[in-house]
Amino acid sequence: MFGKEERSVVIRGRLLFFMEAAFFSGGIPLGRKFRERWFMLLMGSFLVIYIIWPLAGMFYRADWSLVASTTRDNVVIGALWRSIWTAAAATGVIAIFGTPLAYFLARQDFRGKSVLEAIIDVPIMVPHTVAGIAVLMAFSPRTPLGALLVSAGLSPVNSHLGIILACMFVSIPFYVDSARDAFYGVSPRLENVSRTLGATFPHVFFRITLPLAKKGLMSGLIMSWARGVSEFGAIVIIAYHPMVAPTLIYDRFATFGLKYSTPVAVQLILVCLGMFILLRVLVAGKRTEGAGN
Amino acid sequence: MIRLAELSIDLGEFRLDRFSLSVNEGEFFMIVGPSGAGKTVLLEAIAGLHMLSSGRIVIAKRDVTSLPPEKRNVALVYQDYALFPHLTVEENIRWGLRFSRHPDQGHVEGLIRLLRLEQLLRRSPETLSGGEQQRVALARALAVRPSVILLDEPVSALDPRFREDLQDYLSKINQEGMTIMMVTHDFNEVLSLGHRVAVIVEGSLQQVGDVKTVFSEPKNRQVAEFVGMKNIFNSIVTGDRACLEEGTALALNGQRVGGECLIGIRPEDVMVGRDLPEGAGNVFNGKVMAIVPRGMAFEVVFQVNGFRLAGRMLSSALVREDLHPGEECRVGFHSGSIHVFKDTNTI
């Protein structure tokens, strides 16, 4: 369960999905095919262990009395909550603008489409500190945009707004890619047929396309949110304060050392991983409603 | 009923070029052509799913060229059924009714009975057989009382036993007055269901007409090849004789406008037999070169003088005439089965 949830973050599910499909697809495993599958599992489990081992070690070595006391630490709780809601807010904004973008990419072929898709994936490649610097420069009060925000009482630097802006930048590809693939999975013929039967485009989109793409969209939202919660590099540059959990962990590590940063880290992992697993289970539970392939 | 005037569409990989066609009310109209010819694009264009680069579409006396699909009152049924997987069979069938101002429940009940869907209403589409899915797709399309129904190869994905079943339903629906436009690549289907047929090759209309006429009198080589006219020869026609390139003269059943023409003979019209009368005209001594199984029948290739003739024979005929490769035999065809045409690319 643990590895199954974590894997998507790291390799986005592909490799282990194949392994899982090979292993649990039912049927009678026979001879050569069976041995090949075992080989694949053996090789693949290296990565699964690579994810579980360090995290499990952290839990094993953590000073649980300190963990217990940090659960009552208002600074820690505040930072955790801030991480959760800012990432959610960023994901919300991404969903509003990213859903039409993803639908457009899934349905339209045009020259330069691969360039556009590459641009959307740039935040995955850009070092997060660089992303933070870029966002900071774009929204600093010295730019017209930043000045406008400041005059409206919304400072983008060292504020919740700054955290959300940084989260958005790094989370965009996770939602848009996933949503685009989800829309690809819904046959345009279903939309065509429902149009000819009298439904307008918005009706088709909300009653046919969205329900059928729901699973992929939800998993995109979760991925985008998870990326936001785990973000440190970009946030720390635009908003060291107010502190989100990763910043707090870094702050404790730099100021008090490993012993005092670990309890916060353990708590972040417990809370966020818990939510992550819960959401994924909820989404997986709706699988029976069927997405179009 | 449907009138397409100078329709042009350019989708990059598919294009239709200045396409004009009319379909009459209550007609079962067939569209055939090699794959990639743009047949599906044509149906989708009529349904309003593609942008036209030029031309007009009139359906039921209404110019729908600029109307969106939902305002055209045209139903489209795809080969892969395109049932909504997240809805039950009944919800699928009733999907279109919610947009209708006066939903006709009685009509839907009637369709459910006609297509024998009573037992399936609560099922999910994924649990149905191909034939059942296609019946549901038909019911869903007919439920909105469209003025025409467009079928894109509705039976080709079905098992043979469901195929005839569905063809019977289609024929029944057509007899009740529904105008049907159907894309297919099955000649038998065209012959058994269609009133008129249009042959499309590479986005342009090659021939439109009565099914029997198109099959026996194709207008050009592409259509002739497509409708299964295996024997196509270049010839010079003078009066009532056609002279093939290698010198054989064939008797025609009347005077024709002379010149360089193509002549075509359908393989079904090729006769073979020791007792073929000498004076009947086009009877020759031939030699069996090959016998190739083609479904329920055989294609027999004869060498006659300097040309090759393909005939279509049932196995009973092969046995009766004792035909084997290398065997000498008498082979011929009536002068009336010779179709003389010019090789033009437009109509």
Image (cartoon, rainbow, N blue to C red):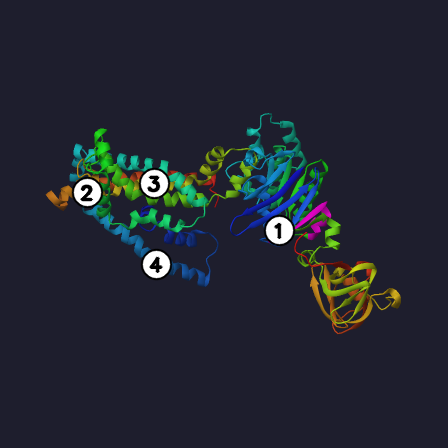
Mark 4 or 2 closer to N-term? 4
As displayed, is residue B71 above or below residue B55?
above
The amino acid type found where label 1 is placed reads Ser
Residue A197 quadrant: top right
Pointer 4 residue:
A42
The amino acid type found where label 2 is placed reads Ile
Label 4 is found on which chain of the structure?
A
Pointer 3 residue:
A222
Mark 3 or 4 closer to N-term? 4
Q: SS class of the residue under badge 3?
A: helix
The question of residue B197 being in magenta is answered with yes
Question: Which labelled disc corresponds to residue B204?
Answer: 1
Respond whether the residues carrying marks 3 and 4 are from the same subunit: yes
As displayed, is residue A19 above or below residue B196?
below
The question of residue B192 being in magenta is answered with yes
Span shown in magenta: B187-204
Q: Considering depth in this image, is A293 or B236 the residue closer to the camera?
A: B236
Question: Which labelled disc corresponds to residue A237?
Answer: 2
Residues at marks 3 and 4 touching, judged by CB atoms closer than 8 Å: no
Q: Residues within 10 Å of mark 2 (few under 14, many from 20)?
A: many
Q: Residues within 10 Å of mark 1 (few under 14, many from 20)?
A: many
The Cα–Cα distance between marks 1 and 4, rounded to whole angstroms, is: 58 Å
Residues at marks 2 and 1 touching, judged by CB atoms closer than 8 Å: no
